[in-house]
């Protein structure tokens, strides 16, 4: 998962992606941090105040943060509040996570990621100007949850080591920005994708085969075989399909 925050080798299916915006966005982020930091974001999350960063024109965020620190920032940081809400919702469903103190739970925050093919034409469409006086970006983050025990024996009473492995959740968000310069992030809302393009999914699978070879394709095939016995109806909804894909 960590390698996903790095620029991959060039693999194009529908046209070239654009890396020419990286220096420009880096300069925007640097200028915003140094001269006009947002009062609605903590120091770590200031990059999200730049719409071009949220739209994936620059480098991706990659932070390894203690849940306690995220929770402490919820009252003053829009992004931390959204991350905390998603993390706590998943945490309540896990005996292992809910039984661990905030100081032992860590979240690896990576993103932004998008439900498109990643080509230059797709990148331009990520900035949504359809609402007057506002620009928004729809994206998802990868939040990897793990527990670092205070003592080696502190997890031994729980059911099985397999349940203690880090795992990822992928909450979807709509980030809303003002149109006035400088454009400011003023809201982070939950978002659910309306539909999913199956051709994009095919492109992702093909890309895995090219980048990672037999290992990735072999694992994907194995998963498909395991699910074949309990395959859902062909009329599966787009919402359910999307959730399976993100898992």
Image (spheres, helix red, strand yellow):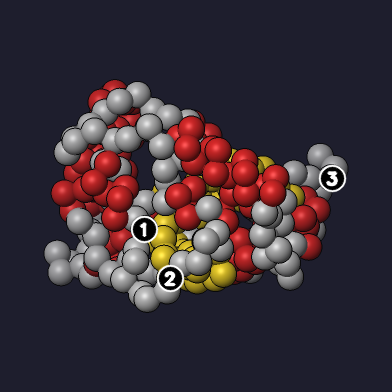
Q: Which of marks 3 and 1 is in front?
A: 1
Residue 242 visible at all = yes
Q: Distance between the residues labelled 2 and 3?
A: 46 Å
Dot 2: element: strand
Q: Is residue 119 above or below residue 239?
A: above
Q: Mark 2 points at which residue?
A: 134
Picture residue at 42% right of the left edge, 74% below the top:
133
Q: Where is 140 relative to 57, above or below?
A: below
Dot 3 crowding, Cα within 10 Å, few <14, some 14–19, many 20+: few
What SS does tag 3 mark? loop
C-alpha separation, residue under disc 3 versus residue under disc 1: 43 Å
What residue is at 17 percent from the left and 38 percent from the top? 14
Q: Viewer-proximal residue, 213 or 31?
A: 31
Residue 4 to residue 124: above or below = above
Residues marked 3 and 1 touching at CB (< 8 Å): no
Give the image location of residue 230, x and y in percent.
26, 59
Tell which circle, 2 or 1, labels the residue nearer the N-terminal end: 1
The residue under label 3 is 150
Dot 1: what SS?
Answer: loop
Residue 139 percent coordinates (x, y): 42, 57
Task: Please identify, in this view, whether the residue under mark 2 or under mark 3 is nearer the observer.
Answer: 2
- Point out which mark residue 127 bears: 1
């Amino acid at each position: 998962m960590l390698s996903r925050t790095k620029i991959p080798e060039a693999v194009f299916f529908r046209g070239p992606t654009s890396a020419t915006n990286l220096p420009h966005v880096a300069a925007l982020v640097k200028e915003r941090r140094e001269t006009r930091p947002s009062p609605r974001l903590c120091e770590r999350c200031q990059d999200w105040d730049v719409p071009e960063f949220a739209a994936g024109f620059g480098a991706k965020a990659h932070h390894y943060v203690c849940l306690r620190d995220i929770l402490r920032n919820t009252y003053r940081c829009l992004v931390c509040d959204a991350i905390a809400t998603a993390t706590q919702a998943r945490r309540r469903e896990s005996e292992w996570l809910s039984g661990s103190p905030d100081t032992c739970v860590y979240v690896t925050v990576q993103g932004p990621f998008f439900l498109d093919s990643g080509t230059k034409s797709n990148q331009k469409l990520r900035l949504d100007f359809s609402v007057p006086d506002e620009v928004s970006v729809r994206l998802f983050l990868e939040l990897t949850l793990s527990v670092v025990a205070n003592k080696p024996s502190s997890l031994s009473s729980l059911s099985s080591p397999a349940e203690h492995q880090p795992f990822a959740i992928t909450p979807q968000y709509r980030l809303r920005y003002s149109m006035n310069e400088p454009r400011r992030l003023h809201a982070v809302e939950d978002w659910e994708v309306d539909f999913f393009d199956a051709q994009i999914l095919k492109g992702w699978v093909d890309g895995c085969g090219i980048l990672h070879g037999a290992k990735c394709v072999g694992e994907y095939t194995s998963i498909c075989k395991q699910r074949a016995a309990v395959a859902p109806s062909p009329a599966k909804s787009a919402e359910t399909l999307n959730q399976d894909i993100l898992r």
